[in-house]
Image: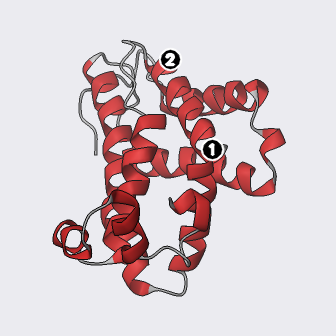
Amino acid sequence: MITEVGYSALSIEAVAARARVGKATVYRWWPRKVDLVVEALHDSALELVPEPDTGSLRDDVRELIEGLVALVSSPVGQVLAEVWSESERSPELKAALERVFLTRRRQVSRGVLDKAAKRLEVSEGLDIDLVSEVVVAAVFYRAKMGNEGLGKEFIDSLTDLLMSGIAANASTMTRNLR
């Protein structure tokens, strides 16, 4: 529903009517519109960007980037951009996005890199949170500039760039991550 009307026009009353339940039922699960929207966005994003587990760091990173590109290119991604913009005017929304959306997205990236660390595929002292932020920032920035720059060439280039910074070599292999 949010992809149809946008964040500002969305109301709990309309959600309840669409779901054919009373407002109290919706409020029982999501006490505020912010909670409903952030959880819906996160769940939708998780469908588009699941945690890859191919057994290869390069393939996992590439799948993660492909998923993020699919997300920002989707109607959910357009709503996410709107909600993120709205969060600059709403500390409550910003806090909810950071608490739910960003924390859970970082957990996905951390899962990918932790598995790679166990396979000795990442550099010693890797700042996993920074890597996660770089991936998301690059994709979202490119989307903001226009989705036409989000093709295979971009995905391949970003994958190569990330691999040059995070992949282990024989002298730096470790299982310890920050």
Relative to 105, does residue 115 appear above or below in the rendering? above
Q: CA distance from mark 1 to mark 2?
A: 22 Å
Q: Amino acid at mark 2?
A: Asp
Identified at 42% across, 36% down, the residue is: 47
Identified at 50% across, 59% down, the residue is: 1
Tell me: 167 left or right of 5. left
Say which of 83 and 144 sits in front: 83
Q: Amino acid at mark 1?
A: Ser
Relative to 120, does residue 122 appear above or below in the rendering? below
Q: Examine the image and state in which quarter residue 83 appears.
A: bottom right
Circle 1: element type: loop
Q: Examine the image and state in which quarter residue 40 appears.
A: bottom left
Relative to 69, does residue 163 appear above or below in the rendering? above
| Residue under label 1 | 74
Q: x, y (%) of residue 14? A: 43, 71
Identified at 57% across, 42% down, the residue is: 71
Q: Residues within 10 Å of mark 1 (few under 14, many from 20)?
A: some
Q: x, y (%) of residue 75? A: 62, 49
Q: x, y (%) of residue 126? A: 39, 40
* Sequence-first tag of 1 and 2: 2
Q: What colouring method underlies this structural image?
A: secondary structure
| Residue under label 2 | 59
Circle 2: element type: helix
